[in-house]
Amino acid sequence: MQTKAKSKKHQSSKFTKKKEFSFPLERENFMIIGLGVLLLVIGYILMSQNSVDGFLPTVIAPILLVAGYCVVIPYGILKKPKSEIAETPAEEVSETASSNVKTS
């Protein structure tokens, strides 16, 4: 009987722990991603022109699309918030940067 009571108590303690959920992206990240989407829209609008010899559809539009897809949007996703950078103590960073190679 005691083991059942203990196991029920142990199981109920599992569910009472609440994990804090923090969304990894902040307003600044969404602004950068929005800028990337804006670049994509402008690039596709420029590319939709029916000019084969035109400078905008053949040169500028692909540059905007590559910049949007490969630079701006990934940067917006991967950029860490300033609060997360400030929370990392300097000691922690130096410990992880140390090498395990022995020189004797």
Image: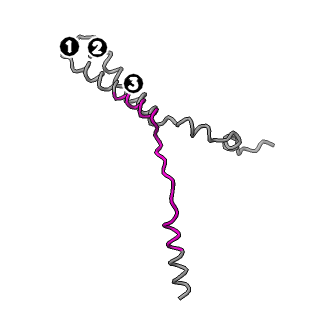
If the image is split into quadrants, where does the C terminus sit?
top right
The first of marks 2 and 3 along the sequence is: 2
SS at mark 1 in the image: loop
- Percent position of residue 3, x then y: 55, 84
The first of marks 1 and 2 along the sequence is: 1
Q: Amino acid at mark 2?
A: Leu
92 lies above or below 47: below
From the image, tell me which residue sits under label 1: 51
Q: Are marks 2 and 3 in contact (CB under 8 Å)?
A: no
In depth, the one of 39 and 71 nearer the eye is 39
User: Mark 1 Cα within 10 Å, few/some/many (few <14, many 20+)?
Assistant: few
Q: Amino acid at mark 1?
A: Ser
Q: Is residue 79 magenta?
A: no
From the image, tell me which residue sits under label 3: 67
User: Mark 2 Cα within 10 Å, few/some/many (few <14, many 20+)?
Assistant: some
SS at mark 3 in the image: helix
In depth, the one of 86 and 65 nearer the eye is 86
Residue placed farthest to the right in the image?
Answer: 104
For residue 38, side relative to residue 86 (left or right): left
Q: Residue at x 24, y 11 (%)?
A: 54
- Percent position of residue 102, x then y: 76, 44
- Percent position of residue 35, x then y: 38, 26
C-alpha gap between disc 2 and disc 3: 15 Å
C-alpha gap between disc 1 and disc 3: 22 Å
From the image, tell me which residue sits under label 2: 56
